Image (cartoon, rainbow, N blue to C red):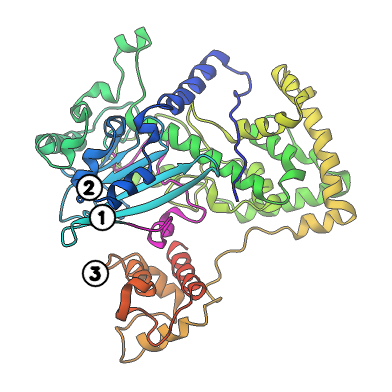
């Protein structure tokens, strides 16, 4: 089902000129190549090249990519993805001018993922992300494109899929990892090694303008550039703005699909804005005490879930002891999360683009869309009078805009919760956690085979022990998880598991989901 397209609106007044400049810059990036070859090139274009055998190697595929895609990129020297990296042979993330189609590759035959391109495409119609892997084989002289969002992508990117990318103020393991701070000494050494090989390398040689990554001006604007207003954001920050904009569109579309969304839309909008005061009054009087009780319980149960994101990122930086503090702070709106997760049903993993899915960072950089903007435009499309109230906000205790949102919310929620509002409010619980005890019936085949003399010893009967092993190991197809998922697929042929079972598609999906969720737990 296609999710509704959600338009963008300007942020609430504040430092208006600065916000409008940043916002328009972000939209300008998204629209700059609307009619260009880069905007038109996508996974279908790449698939056609592979299908017709116009490209038979990864190097040929890179050469076929449009120039804007090859001149807008970042370089990852310490990768946590399926594609390995090193300072001299980084993983390249090509994102073009709008971030809607991303292609990644690495350059060392000794690193994992050397034979594959990884792609991400944002679907404008459904506001959703789609990941694929394009694998090239020297033996067959051609490429193979995976299914949409295959299990090996889902284990990290989730379902529904989301991009994984750190936000401001640092991008550990990516050249220019400290926002507007230039390259550290270890980064500079690694960059020198990379640039020494870049021009003559069959893969890296396809990059346009790679030498600028050795220049300080790429990461830190000079005083003259700032004075002239000609400074631009560093590559990592540009990618953050683009992905944050697309991700919040996907998040808002997911949220609007939840059945309780319509009744809670005014409360959600106020919570996303964060400046309408105590939202208890947005709920019917009979349910307010229950609202306070449920909110307090939610806050206790999720305390600390967002704490530690910056600490974790600091430990991952190559120069983790430098005391770097520049940039934006982690933002976590408990009220927004409570309404969205507990009352509406938004999956808890959808908030942040951070690899650590349990951490919620709701901050968006200047220039990217916010959830409040998207929710407002959705409401204002059918209730235009809200736009005037928002335009002339007073930001006082009697703000007419917030007061009107409160009145409409109370009416909508009174109808939604009805006479049993208190019970419904208190009965609302967070999304169920993964239940390792709910094992697929066919898992018993795995337990018997790998607990005896048939297969290698693996703890299929112990979810905790198995979960810790699934992301590790040097198996023929990657990690233990990759090997298990391969063995469940028809492509495994005679090596398909479980032995002696002709898996139906639904049985295969049930087992895949079990192992993927166990690994991501």
Mark 1–mark 3 distance (CA, rounded to whole Å): 19 Å
Q: Is residue 184 left or right of residue 202?
A: right
Callout 3 crowding tier (Cα within 10 Å): few <14, some 14–19, many ≥20: few
Q: Does label 1 or label 3 sit earlier along the sequence?
A: 1
Counting the numbered discs, the total is 3
Residue 216 in magenta stretch:
no
Q: Does label 2 or label 3 sit earlier along the sequence?
A: 2
309 to 154, vertically: above or below: above
Marks 1 and 3 in Cβ contact (< 8 Å): no
Q: Quadrant of residue 182?
A: top left
Q: What label does residue 458 carry, if any?
A: none
For disc 3, the marked residue is 476
Span colored in magenta:
145-174
Marks 2 and 1 in Cβ contact (< 8 Å): yes
Q: Position of residue 410 (x, y in %)?
A: 83, 40
Residue shown at the point (73%, 50%) measured from the top left: 260
- Observer able to see residue 86: no
28 to 287, vertically: above or below: above
Mark 3 residue element: loop
Q: Does label 2 or label 1 sit earlier along the sequence?
A: 2
For disc 1, the marked residue is 143
Mark 2–mark 1 distance (CA, rounded to whole Å): 8 Å
Q: Depth-wise, is mark 1 or mark 3 nearer the camera?
A: 1
Q: Position of residue 463 (x, y in %)?
A: 45, 75
Q: Is residue 286 left or right of residue 405?
A: right
Q: Depth-wise, is mark 2 or mark 3 nearer the camera?
A: 2
Callout 2 crowding tier (Cα within 10 Å): few <14, some 14–19, many ≥20: many
Taking depth in this image into account, of 393 and 477 the one nearest to the observer is 477
């Amino acid at each position: 089902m296609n999710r509704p397209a959600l338009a963008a609106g300007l942020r609430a007044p504040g430092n208006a000129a600065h916000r409008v400049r940043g916002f328009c810059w972000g939209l300008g990036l998204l629209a700059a190549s609307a009619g260009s070859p880069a905007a038109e090139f996508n996974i279908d274009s790449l698939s056609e090249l592979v299908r017709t055998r116009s490209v038979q190697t990864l190097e040929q595929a890179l050469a076929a990519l449009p120039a804007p895609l090859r001149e807008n990129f970042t370089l990852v020297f310490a990768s946590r993805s399926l594609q390995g990296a090193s300072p001299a042979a980084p993983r390249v993330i090509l994102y073009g001018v709008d971030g809607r189609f991303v292609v990644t590759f690495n350059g060392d035959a000794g690193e994992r993922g050397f034979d594959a391109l990884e792609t991400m495409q944002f679907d404008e119609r459904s506001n959703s992300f789609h990941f694929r892997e394009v694998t090239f084989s020297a033996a067959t002289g051609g490429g193979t494109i995976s299914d949409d969002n295959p299990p090996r992508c889902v284990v990290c990117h989730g379902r529904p899929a989301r991009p994984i990318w750190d936000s401001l103020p640092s991008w550990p393991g990516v050249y220019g990892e400290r926002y507007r701070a230039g390259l550290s000494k270890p980064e500079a050494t690694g960059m020198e090694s990379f640039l020494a090989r870049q021009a003559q390398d069959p893969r890296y040689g396809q990059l346009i303008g790679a030498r600028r990554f050795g220049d300080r001006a790429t990461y830190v604007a000079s005083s003259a550039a700032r004075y002239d207003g000609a400074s631009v954001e560093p590559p990592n920050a540009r990618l953050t703005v683009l992905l944050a904009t697309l991700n919040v569109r996907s998040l808002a579309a997911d949220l609007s699909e939840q059945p309780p969304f319509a009744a809670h839309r005014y409360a959600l909008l106020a919570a996303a804005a964060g400046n309408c005061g105590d939202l208890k009054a947005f709920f019917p009087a009979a349910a307010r005490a229950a609202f306070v009780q449920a909110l307090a319980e939610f806050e206790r149960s999720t305390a600390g879930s967002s704490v530690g994101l910056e600490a974790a990122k600091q430990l991952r930086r190559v120069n983790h002891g430098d005391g770097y503090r520049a940039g934006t702070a982690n933002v976590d709106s408990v009220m927004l999360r409570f309404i969205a997760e507990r009352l509406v049903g938004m999956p808890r993993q959808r908030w942040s683009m951070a690899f650590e899915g349990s951490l919620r960072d709701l901050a968006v950089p200047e220039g990217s869309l916010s959830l409040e903007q998207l929710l407002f435009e959705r409401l204002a499309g059918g209730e235009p009078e809200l736009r005037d109230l928002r335009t002339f906000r007073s930001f006082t205790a009697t703000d007419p805009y917030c007061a009107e949102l409160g009145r409409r919310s109370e009416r909508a929620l009174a109808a939604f919760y009805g006479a049993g509002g208190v019970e419904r409010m208190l009965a609302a619980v967070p999304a169920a956690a993964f239940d390792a005890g709910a094992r697929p019936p066919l898992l018993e085949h795995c337990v018997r085979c790998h607990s005896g003399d048939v297969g290698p010893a693996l703890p299929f009967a112990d979810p905790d022990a198995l979960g810790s092993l699934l992301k590790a190991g040097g198996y023929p197809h990657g990690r233990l998880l990759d090997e298990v998922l391969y063995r469940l697929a028809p492509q495994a042929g005679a090596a398909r598991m479980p032995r002696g079972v002709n898996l139906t598609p639904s049985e295969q999906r049930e087992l895949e989901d079990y192992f993927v969720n166990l690994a991501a737990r």
